[in-house]
Amino acid sequence: MNTLRDLAYDIEDCLDRFLLCCDCEGYDDVSLLSKFPAEIKSLIVDLLRTRQQIKDYADMNKIMSQQMASGSTADKATSRALLAKPQLTSGIMKAEEELISILVDHVESEQEQLRAICIVGFGGSGKTRLAREVYDSFQDGPTFTTRAWVDACKYKDDYKGLLIDLLKRLPKLEDRITGDSDVEQLRTEISNYLNTNRSLVVFDDIDEQQWDDSILPEETKSRIIVTTTSQAAANNCRSDGGYIYNMKTLDENDSKALLKAMFKKRPTYFDREVATPIVGKCDGHPLALVSVAKYLKMGNDLRENCTKVCGSLGSQMEEQSAFQELRRVLMSNYGNLLYVPKQSDEAVAHDNFNQLIERNIIEPMHISDDAIVNTCRTYAVMRELMLHTSFCDHFIGSIDADQSEPTNFRHLFIQNDKNNRVNWSGRKEDRARSLTIFGSGKDSISYITKLELLQVLDLMECTDFSDNLLKDIMNKLRRLKYLSLGSATKKVPKTIKELHCLHTLDLNKTNVVALPIEVIKLPHLVHLFGKVKLRKKKSINALQAIYDIISKKETIGQKSKLQTLSGFIIDEDSIIPELMIHMRGLGKVKIWCDSTGERNTDWIIHLKEAIENMVMYEMDTGVGVRSLSLYLGNALENLLGRLGETNGFLTTLKLHGRLSQFPEFVTSLTGIKELCLSSTNLTGSDLSGSGLGELPCLLYLKLVEYNLVGFVIKKGDYPVLQRLCLVVESPNPILPKIEEEALPELVSLHLLCVRLGDLAGINIRNHTNLQEVALDSAIIYCDREA
């Protein structure tokens, strides 16, 4: 299989080097193929097709071999039962008490309603163990007269089999099963039984296709517990009146307690010196801790084995029998997502990213107010497995002082510090397509500049890559498509014009202030990130270059591929608004205005035209997302007044700056899903009478104001609003009034003010779909009547 993958890499290398010799930018741009004769063009296309077929075949074999190694469904059920042996941690005991309390309270209350509990989390987090503890706690007692446990993992594609299994486990129902019974008959039998017998049913490891609330009548004393890795299945459970319990990783104390329990027969065999590195490596994953403990107990020298497993956990997971269950769980969760064909469509990539979150494969670390995940991470044991697998496949390689020079890896990362510097000569046969550097990078410059096929260079966390070193890179690495720079960069050299293939330039972490015009002239640049200025230079040559661009309006409109300008600072000498007029593909724009720009507002005329073009180009370009963020201070009202009723299209609008009245520009736009108004000096009364509540697509509204007195949300306003964030900066804030039955779709409410008093206008009990309420961490409650 590695031979197949290497063959695919060899084909790609030949293509890249051929195009490099021809001084071409890449075979992914169809227009570039036209410069070759028909025979060569056909050969390139055939080679590309062959390369992809080889990769797909290798990936398929990889997945099949992993699935074969993981064992049958029956083996999985057996190993799941064995997993429930280790000592309970305090975290599991607290969760058990919470779930038991919920079940008892609702079953013994007079209100008979559908009640299901869904335990959701990543593979190996202890869902089955928790469900089993709760299930066993009702073995004796009056709460439930019958119980049934079904391993749903056996019936992923057999829903009828799932129902038959449940029927067999319910007393006196097995004799009613016949070969002719259809799904509807089975549902009816189960539903009738659960309606007349107070039962507790557990479906262990279900997916979203298997969840079906129809087996429970609307009013019953029976209850269901399900465990799942699928967030969609959990959401289905909640929508049917259920409760979601999200599994948590173990903290340090619980992790050590679990390890100690695994060594309880040999207590002298285990101490703090051994426990600490294991806890750090396993990152609170219960199955990982159990598996590592099993591996350590197999050897004679505990400390030696501990050092070994902590230094190479990924390879140990693949090779050692003690990790068989952990390996199966990880690969069943991630195997089919690790090796997929390359996707060029950003929308598909976004959907795949959401799928990883939905399956609890990656964990969101920071979620913004509008529910967008900004940062995430995978679990430590999965990261170890991914790194090891990628290393074995020559996909990702780590370079450090103890390794020889890599030549076959596609993606490399270098981590240097003051005591560990890496410096390689580099060779032309190196296959690296991407390189990430942490820490010091200047000693690696001779190596980097010889990676002539490099397409991605990430220097965001590089601490000493100076402006002079950048010149060498831009002269040598002409196939770069992605470049991010770090804090050591203060100036982007004009030699950036050599990067004809550059697709993304990220300057967010740099100290760059002024940008050379050569950046805007890059023919394939799509995304530009940072907070920079583009000025009219005093140099005659620079001025001529700018006006040459502006004079060729049609050429810019046809050739500019810029979609993201996030963002630019406008000052008294800014040229960017004049250039934006001719950029027809802009989808995300963020602009600040400094004090000199507020005084000299000649740029407003050009920016007005640029924004009008941006919001009206939707039908021409087919770009489905339009985001505009304006932080213009006192100049905001001047601009919005000139825009008036534009009748354009935007999906996201953020406005920061003083206004004397609500702008017509906002309500004249169609498609707005997210709106943020910050420091506008508008009152609640200004907002209530503005027509803001009539925006038909608005899903997220954020208001950051000093005073929201008079803001009333009536029934029928904001018909589809799901997320509302109110930041009131007054020391004595008055929150808005939300009428009963208003905001029926609300799922998230953020009330961020340092003092919280009268809440008479907001009653969260009226919002049946509400899932989240957030308050300021420094909040002080004030009883106004007192």
Image (spheres, rainbow, N blue to C red):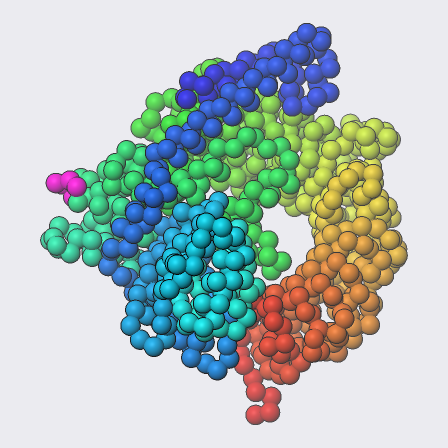
x, y percentage for residue 758?
Answer: 62, 83
Q: Examine the image and state in which quarter residue 782 appears.
A: bottom right
Report the residue at 51% width, 20% height from top: 54
| Front-most of residues 391 and 155 | 155
Q: Is residue 165 above or below residue 431?
A: below
* Residue that extends furthest to the bottom in the rendered view of this protein: 786
**Residue 642 painted magenta:** no
Tell me the quarter of the image containing the N terminus. Answer: top left
Report the residue at 60% width, 82% height from top: 757
x, y percentage for residue 228?
Answer: 44, 54
Q: Examine the image and state in which quarter residue 739 appears.
A: bottom right
| Front-most of residues 727 and 361 | 361
Report the residue at 82% width, 68% height from top: 690
x, y percentage for residue 544?
Answer: 81, 29
- The image shows a total of numbered marks equal to 0
Report the residue at 54% width, 21% height from top: 53
| Front-most of residues 222 and 286 | 222
Q: Is residue 374 left or right of residue 542?
A: left
Q: Is residue 296 left or right of residue 77?
A: left
Instruction: Say if residue 249 shows up in the picture.
Output: no
Q: Is residue 339 above or below residue 616?
A: above
Instruction: Say if residue 760 shows up in the picture.
Output: yes
In magenta, the rendered stretch is 298-303
x, y percentage for residue 700?
Answer: 68, 61
Q: Is residue 168 left or right of residue 469?
A: left
Q: Is residue 429 above or below residue 246?
A: above
Tell me the quarter of the image containing the C terminus. Answer: bottom right
Q: Is residue 726 left or right of residue 286?
A: right
